[in-house]
């Protein structure tokens, strides 16, 4: 990845952790807005990382649920 993508992804990880800790998903949009004022490229990379990491987390949750359900089925 490029430096921009690396930095944006690291920020996305930190923001997602903060959202979990604070329970405030408006933080994502606030950070994205701040980024867009100085670097739309970084803002786009940040939002891509947010979307990818959020989608992956949802998919893993579904997988875990299905596996748990399968283990308890007769």
Image: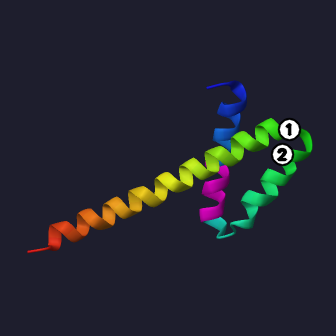
Question: Relative to residue 56, is residue 63 drawn left or right?
Answer: left
Which residue is farthest left? 74
Q: Which residues are magenta?
A: 13-20
Q: Is residue 18 magenta?
A: yes
**Nearer the observer, 11 or 63:** 63
Circles 2 and 1, Cβ within 8 Å, touching? The answer is yes
Q: Residue at x 59, y 64 (%)?
A: 20
Q: Residue at x 16, y 73 (%)?
A: 72
* Placement of the C terminus among the 4 image quadrants: bottom left
Residue wearing tag 1: 39
Whether residue 31 sits left or right of residue 3 in the image: it is right
- Classify 55 as above or below 69: above
Quick one: 69 or 19, which is closer to the camera? 69
Q: Position of residue 43 (x, y in %)?
A: 78, 43
Q: Percent position (x, y) of residue 50?
A: 63, 50
Neighbours of disc 2 within 10 Å: few (<14), some (14-19), many (20+): some
Task: Assign the magenta stretch its main secondary structure.
Answer: helix
| Residue at image point 90% right, 40% down | 38
At mark 2, the secondary structure is helix
């Amino acid at each position: 990845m490029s430096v921009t993508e690396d930095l944006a992804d690291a920020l996305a990880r930190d923001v997602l952790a903060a959202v979990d800790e604070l329970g405030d998903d408006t933080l994502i949009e606030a950070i994205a807005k701040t980024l867009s004022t100085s670097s739309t490229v970084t803002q786009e990379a940040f939002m891509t990382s947010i979307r990818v990491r959020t989608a992956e987390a949802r998919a893993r949750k579904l997988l875990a649920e299905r596996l748990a359900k399968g283990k308890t089925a007769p």
